[in-house]
């Protein structure tokens, strides 16, 4: 039972790292486009990679979250506390 749990948790960490790397490679601002929502407002969309359907406001937040998911554990291991 313990071996299965360790295997599942290890696969979760590996797949999480792969998804975070894919999100970090979504940082390209050359493919932006404008979209009119149901309220008639024009919104600038990211337009590239994993976050191509997200707005210019949300995509950098998600990319920053991917960065922290990938590099955050290393910082936690090296903290003086």
Image (cartoon, grey):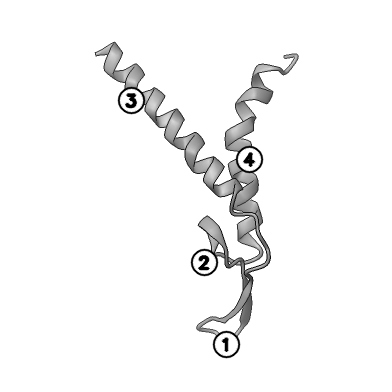
Label 4 or label 1, whichever comes before in sequence order: 1
Quadrant location of the C terminus in the rendered image: top right
Instruction: Tell me whether the residue at label 4 lies in contact with that at label 1, contact meaning CB atoms closer than 8 angstroms.
Output: no
Quadrant location of the N terminus in the rendered image: top left
Which residue is under mark 3?
Answer: 8
Instruction: Tell me whether the residue at label 2 lies in contact with that at label 3, contact meaning CB atoms closer than 8 angstroms.
Output: no
Residue 45 is left or right of residue 4, and the answer is right
Give the CA separation, mark 4 to mark 2: 19 Å
Q: Percent position (x, y) of residue 2?
A: 29, 12
Residue 53: assigned label: 2
Q: Nearer the viewer, mark 2 or mark 1?
A: 2
Above or below, 77 relative to 22: above
Badge 1: residue crowd in 10 Å (few <14, some 14–19, many ≥20): few
Label 3 or label 1, whichever comes before in sequence order: 3
Give the CA separation, mark 2 to mark 1: 18 Å
Label 2 or label 1, whichever comes before in sequence order: 1
**What kind of element bears circle 3?**
helix
Label 4 or label 3, whichever comes before in sequence order: 3
Badge 3: residue crowd in 10 Å (few <14, some 14–19, many ≥20): few
Badge 2: residue crowd in 10 Å (few <14, some 14–19, many ≥20): some
Instruction: Tell me whether the residue at label 4 lies in contact with that at label 2, contact meaning CB atoms closer than 8 angstroms.
Output: no
Give the CA separation, mark 4 to mark 1: 33 Å
Above or below, 33 relative to 7: below
- Going 27% across and 18% down the picture, which residue do you hit? 4
Which residue is under mark 4?
Answer: 67
């Amino acid at each position: 039972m313990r071996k299965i749990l360790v295997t599942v948790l290890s696969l979760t960490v590996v797949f999480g790292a792969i998804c975070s790397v894919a999100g970090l490679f979504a940082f390209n601002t050359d493919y932006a486009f404008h979209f009119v929502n149901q309220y008639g407002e024009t919104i600038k969309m990211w337009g590239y990679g994993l976050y191509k359907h997200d707005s210019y406001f949300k995509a950098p937040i998600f990319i920053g979250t991917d960065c922290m998911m990938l590099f955050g554990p290393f910082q936690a291991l090296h903290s003086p506390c």
